[in-house]
Amino acid sequence: MRGVVERQKRYVTVISKTDEDGRVTPLTVVWEDGVHYDIDRVLDVRQACSLKTGGCGVRYTVKVGGHPTYLFFEGPRWFVEAKVVPLP
């Protein structure tokens, strides 16, 4: 995306399911304006830190709208590396 100068840690609401073994699967990300983004697929789950915004936890590599992105669970909250677009 043109004009993106940085990423910002943005806490979001996540609708998820937890199975009987305690595995958490995120299903939907709810943005601050209330828009719901369904997660098409979880590609990877691992302990990792966000190199772009800081913070560590469980990093989910997910596909949303066909595009891969990271979703972090920094217990007890979820965050994404939101794009910051400069004002014109």
Image: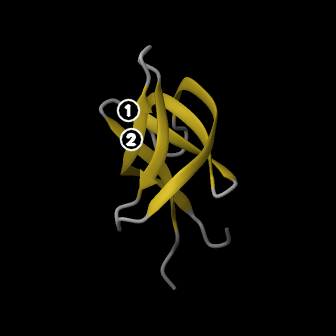
Instruction: Give me the residue at 33% from left, 29% from top.
Output: 75
- Given the current orientation, which residue lies at the most extreme front position? 20
Which of the two residues, 79 or 7, is positioned nearer the viewer here?
A: 79
Label ID, residue 78: 2
The answer to whether one can see residue 55 in this image is: no
**Cβ atoms at labels 2 and 1 below 8 Å apart:** yes
- Given the current orientation, which residue lies at the most extreme top position? 21
Instruction: Give me the residue at 39% from left, 45% from top.
Output: 14
Q: Quadrant of residue 55?
A: top left
Q: Quadrant of the N terminus?
A: bottom right
**What amino acid is labelled 2 in the image?**
Trp
Q: Mark 1 points at which residue?
A: 74
Question: Badge 2: few (under 14), some or many (20 or more) residues near its Cα, within 10 Å?
Answer: many
Determine the secondary structure under disc 2: strand
- Given the current orientation, which residue lies at the most extreme bottom position? 88
For the image shown, how many numbered marks are present on the structure? 2
Query: Distance of mark 2 from mark 1, alpha carbons?
Result: 6 Å
The answer to whether one can see residue 14 in this image is: yes
Question: Badge 1: few (under 14), some or many (20 or more) residues near its Cα, within 10 Å?
Answer: some
Please give left or right for residue 76 compared with residue 14 in the image.
Answer: left
Residue 46 % position (x, y): 57, 24
Image height of 86 relative to 22, above or below: below
Instruction: Give me the residue at 53% from left, 32% from top.
Output: 59
**What amino acid is labelled 1 in the image?**
Glu
Q: Quadrant of residue 33?
A: bottom left
Residue 77 % position (x, y): 32, 38
Please give left or right for residue 29 compared with residue 46 in the image.
Answer: left
Residue 8 % position (x, y): 45, 54
